[in-house]
Amino acid sequence: MTASYSTDRASLLDAADPLARFRSRFLLPSDTIYLDGNSLGPISADVESALQNALESWKTHRIEGWTESENPWLFLPETLGARLAPLIGARPE
């Protein structure tokens, strides 16, 4: 296998990858190929935005964020459990 064949083959596989459309959501330099996806991977713009929103909520609501924020922190474990339940075959509660 020649280097150009490997590059051509990789380009074809990349073009056919159904997940390729998500690459632009991650904050990586355009010339970077990131292969360590099972560890602390690159941050996505979605996560950065969610963290900024959480910080803003904390700053705005302070202690009242537990019960009075847009997504009250007190109930987040139940919300997360209900969303994860179908993935593991559990009941939402």
Image: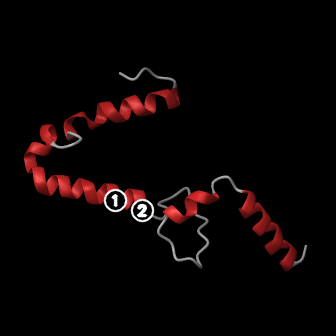
Marks 1 and 2, how far apart at CA: 6 Å
SS for callout 2: helix
* Relative image position of residue 42 (x, y in whole percent): 48, 65
* Relative image position of residue 13 (x, y in whole percent): 76, 61
Residue at image coords 14%, 37%: 67
Residue at image coords 51%, 24%: 89
Q: Residues within 10 Å of mark 2 (few under 14, many from 20)?
A: few
Marking on residue 49: 1
Left or right: 22 as drawn, with respect to 80: right
Give the quarter of the figure containing the N terminus: bottom right
Residue at image coords 36%, 61%: 48
**How many numbered marks, from 0 up?**
2
Query: Which residue corresponds to mark 2?
Result: 45
Left or right: 23 as drawn, with respect to 68: right
Q: Are marks 1 and 2 in contact (CB under 8 Å)?
A: yes
Q: Residues within 10 Å of mark 1 (few under 14, many from 20)?
A: few
Q: Is 1 placed above or below 38 here?
A: below
Q: Looking at the picture, which amino acid does disc 2 mark? A: Ala
* Relative image position of residue 91 (x, y in whole percent): 43, 20
Q: Looking at the picture, which amino acid does disc 1 mark? A: Ser
Comparing 88 with 23, the one in front is: 23
